[in-house]
Image (cartoon, rainbow, N blue to C red):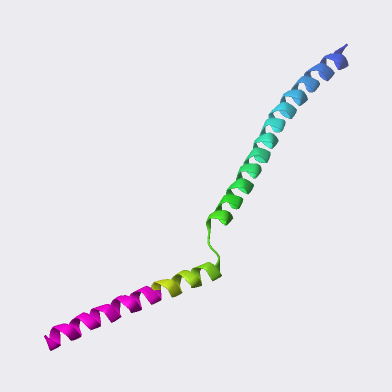
Amino acid sequence: MEMMIWNIILSAILGVISFMLKGKFDEVERLGILLNRTREEVARDHITRGEMNVTIDKLGERFDRAVERLEAKLDTMKKG
């Protein structure tokens, strides 16, 4: 009879511990899924090195044109 009581008590304790551990493992799995989604979103939103080079080149050309226009205006002011 005493062994049966110990079996019931230990089984209950083991059941509670197992239930708590299952909740923790489920939470870790959920966080892993969220982390993977975040990694995908970050990778999607970032630009590549090639895209960055093209953008920098366009920006450089735009500044060059602006400087040329400014120089032309200064030249006309000097002449006039």
At 58% from the left edge and 56% from the top edge, which residue is drawn? 43
Q: Is residue 56 left or right of residue 75?
A: right
At 53% from the left edge and 59% from the top edge, which residue is drawn? 46
Q: Residue furthest top?
A: 1
Q: Is residue 36 left or right of residue 61?
A: right
| Image quarter hosting the N terminus | top right
Q: Is 49 rendered above or below residue 21?
A: below
x and y percentages locating residue 65 in the rendered image: 33, 77
At 66% from the left edge and 40% from the top edge, which residue is drawn? 28
At 34% from the left edge and 75% from the top edge, which residue is drawn? 63
Q: Is 69 rendered above or below residue 10?
A: below
Q: Is residue 25 left or right of residue 60?
A: right
The mark total stands at: 0
Q: Main secondary structure of the magenta part?
A: helix
**Residue 44 sits in which quadrant?**
bottom right
Q: Is 20 rendered above or below residue 44?
A: above
Q: Is 15 rendered above or below residue 54?
A: above
Give the magenta-colored segment's residue range. Answer: 60-80
Q: Residue furthest front?
A: 80
- Relative to the observer, which residue lies in front, 37 or 11? 37
x and y percentages locating residue 78 in the rendered image: 14, 87
Q: Residue furthest bottom?
A: 79
Task: Tell whether position 29 is magenta.
Answer: no
- Relative to the observer, which residue lies in front, 12 or 72? 72
x and y percentages locating residue 50 in the rendered image: 55, 70
Q: Is residue 46 left or right of residue 64?
A: right
| Image quarter hosting the C terminus | bottom left
